[in-house]
Image: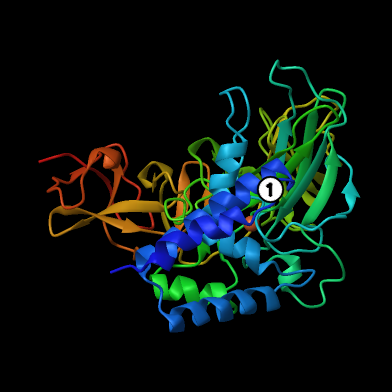
Amino acid sequence: MQNELETKLTDAVIARLSDDADPRFRRIMQSLIRHLHDFVREVELTEEEWFEAIKFLTATGQKCDDKRQEFILLSDVLGVSMLVDAINHRRSGATTETTVLGPFFVHGAKEINNGDDMAAGWKGEPTYVAGRVLSTEGTPLAGALLDLWQSNSEGSYDVQLADTGGKQLRAKLRADAEGRFRLRTILPTSYPVPTDGPMGLVLERMGRHPMRPAHLHFMVSAPGYETVVTHLFVKGDPYLESDVVFGVKDSLIVDFKRDESQVEAQKLKVGAAATVTVAGVEKPVEGKVTLISPALDTGSTTVEVWVKVDNKSGVLKPGTSARVSIAAETVNGAVVVPASSILKDDAGKTSVMVVEKGAAKKREVTTGIADGDDIQIVSAVKAGEQVITTGAYGLDDGTKVKVVVADEKKEEPAAGDKKSGEKD
Ligand SMILES: [Fe+2]
């Protein structure tokens, strides 16, 4: 049974607040005291638990320095940061949704020019980011300032790494006259929030994982406009549904499309042999690759490659259209299937349907070199196995299939016979 002090103490503490205190401060303190006392009464906090809480808050403060903010992390993992964000940014559908600032923002990132590489010197999947800063009326905000920051390909921010030589994987960028911005970087990856401090212990005791889905941070500001703090999340990330800080909103999930031409271009080497074929001319002209552009042309989504040829025969004339084949890589004994056999899911995973004991079995595979209508499979399928080449998308795993060999295709592909899949 509660004694008198337990019930009266709350009002007594609130009554001590000066009438002269700042009204907003008064309101916050009154509410804080009331909720805090109610919480203590509700759980009947023991003295040991009270002291544990004191030790926990002390450790949280002691973990903070100019690079580490354990209190923001505490707020993040308890969902308080997202609640504050939601209350403060009740927006119309015309605006980009906001999300948490997170504990890794650092002031004073280097300003780069539009088109520059924010991740120069960092290993990772090359990524091109472009967008436009507009007012809610659709007016371009020329000169809007974008602050961007992200993790490296192993999921760490510069402030978590020793000897990065200053601020890395973060930049300031100004939108051009049309509000447009563009930059090159690397694909961010999902990462755990720091678990070597008090928050790691809290997450563990709550039975929660510490992961955040891959994202790129943005802070966008322009004079006279409200600043937008948000992320763009990488579609397909396994942690989108269970972000440790509750920061994901559907509108912020973006398809980071893999541009195959750039991936293919990375396999090319200067000096590689090139064969130039001109329509109507039987003998091809041999040449060599002399330059490969490091950047993708975003308009055409192609990569510029220069080939030097010995044009002694004079078959190549200015304006002549020619087809160039470049040997990027040679693989002996490769398993090759028609490109139509490859199935891709929303997460970008590739698979094929293989015929096993009269049934279609889905098998996840890694693909290699693509050459016209053929593609190499580098894992999970052996030479001689039967791969379904048409209609595989409509087949459920385990569907019984009848194998039909196409008459017109007499030549033997390296992976075995080309088959047609039919539902039985
Ligand atoms: Fe982050």
* x and y, in percent, of residue 289 in the image: 79, 51
Dot 1 lies on which element?
helix
Q: Is residue 169 visible?
A: yes
Q: Is residue 344 above or below residue 93?
A: below
Q: Is residue 308 visible?
A: no
**Which residue is nearer to you in this view: 106 or 351?**
106
> Residue flagged by tag 1: what amino acid is it?
Phe
Relative horizontal placement of residue 383, taking residue 401 as reference (left or right): right
Q: Is residue 200 above or below residue 181?
A: below
Residue at the limit of the structure toward the left, as seen here:
424
**Which residue is nearer to you in this view: 331 or 275?**
331
Question: Which residue is painted at 66% across and 49% down in the image?
Answer: 216
* x and y, in percent, of residue 330 in the image: 59, 62
By what rule are the colours in the image chosen?
rainbow
* x and y, in percent, of residue 246 in the image: 49, 52
Question: Which residue is painted at 76% across and 17% down in the image?
Answer: 139
Circle 1 crowding by C-alpha within 10 Å: few under 14, some 14–19, many from 20: few
Relative horizontal placement of residue 424, taking residue 35 as reference (left or right): left
If the picture is divided into quarters, which one holds ligand 1?
A: bottom right
Question: Which residue is painted at 57% across and 60% down in the image?
Answer: 13
Relative horizontal placement of residue 150, taking residue 30 as reference (left or right): right
Q: Is residue 351 above or below residue 281?
A: below
Image-quadrant location for residue 414: bottom left
Residue hosting label 1: 25
Image-quadrant location for residue 321: top right
Residue at the limit of the structure toward the bottom, as seen here:
48
**Which residue is nearer to you in this view: 328 or 203?**
203
* x and y, in percent, of residue 162 in the image: 78, 78
Q: Is residue 142 above or below residue 183?
A: above
Locate the C terminus by quadrant.
top left
**Which residue is nearer to you in this view: 3 or 249?**
3
